[in-house]
Image (tube, grey):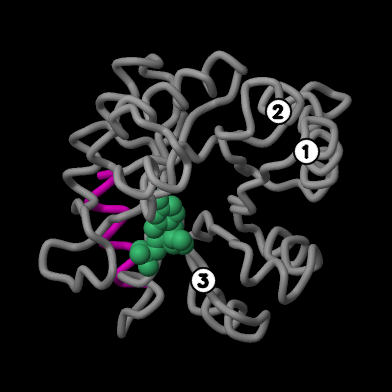
Amino acid sequence: MGKDVIIACDFASKEQVLTFLDKFTGKKPFVKIGMELFYAEGPEIVREIKARGHKIFLDLKLHDIPNTVKKSMAVLSRLDVDMTNLHAAGTVNMMTAALEGLTREDGTRPILIAVTQLTSTDQETMENDLLINKPIDEVVMHYAANAAKAGLDGVVCSPLEAGKVHDRCGKNFVTVTPGVRFADGDVGDQKRVMTPAAAKEIGSDYIVVGRPITAAEDPVAAYTRCCEEFIG
Ligand code: C5P
């Protein structure tokens, strides 16, 4: 899998995201479209950004009964996104169904990755709210293994977990890692962060970077720096 920097386009409207993307006149970055923008603007925003030549990671984190997820994935696949995701908590059956729905008639499909435990869930809330009493690291690795068993391509995880995921699920199993910050940058609300260079070192396949690029004074320079540190 090709290493790349994915910009998290966490904007609330089409106008904001297109104004941001207009700055990139050279290399077209791989972009992540999340729920906020997708729910605000609908599938048309995906078509529009795709038509401008960007690869798209559609981050909608599906989680429902297998049949519903399968049919929804077929719709996302027709939108011609390059990567999408779901919750591993939906079970191996749901992930298998998702993969079937996503696969186009010609056998091609977007990369499908799973969210294991959200980073907003810690050991205490997992035990109290979800009644899962195993150590959270073990739960994350188990969900990653379930995703691999279902035939998915990889998981979203912290760059700190990327090495362990590769050890458990194989080096071709893709790790997509948010929580990336420049050594001299603001950490913001991210708790466990890593620089692009360190994420490269540990073996992340894709880094997802939001505010260090979107809120930078010069977003193109910040993106270029990220690519230089991560891809080389
Ligand atoms: O601005 P920042 O670089 O923190 O953005 C990171 C992006 O990755 C956001 O879109 C955030 O929702 C997403 N993300 C994350 N941690 C996860 C999963 C997704 O930060 N565990």
**Who is closer to the viewer here, 155 or 81?**
155
Residue highlighted by disc 2: 94
Q: Which residues are magenta?
A: 220-232
Residue highlighted by disc 3: 10
Helix, strand or loop at mark 1: helix
Instruction: Tell me whether the residue at label 2 lies in contact with that at label 1, contact meaning CB atoms closer than 8 angstroms.
Output: yes
The numbered disc on residue 69 is: 1
Direction from residue 59 to residue 172 in the image, left or right: left
Direction from residue 155 to residue 191 in the image, left or right: left
Q: Circle 3: is it few (<14), some (14-19), or many (20+) Cα within 10 Å?
A: some
Q: Is residue 106 in sight in this rendering?
A: yes
User: Which residue shows up at 72% across the image and 62% down it?
Assistant: 46
Please identify the dominant SS of the magenta region: helix
If the image is split into quadrants, where does the C terminus sit?
Answer: top left
Direction from residue 160 to residue 213 in the image, left or right: right
Quick check: 5 above or below 224?
above
Q: Position of residue 119 (x, y in %)?
A: 36, 50
Q: In the rendered image, which quarter is residue 41 located in?
A: bottom right
Tag 2: amino acid = Met
User: Which residue shows up at 67% across the image and 80% down it?
Assistant: 14
Helix, strand or loop at mark 3: loop
Q: CA distance from mark 2 to mark 3?
A: 27 Å
Q: In this rendering, which labeled residue sits more in front, label 1 or label 3?
A: 1
**Who is closer to the viewer here, 176 or 18?**
176
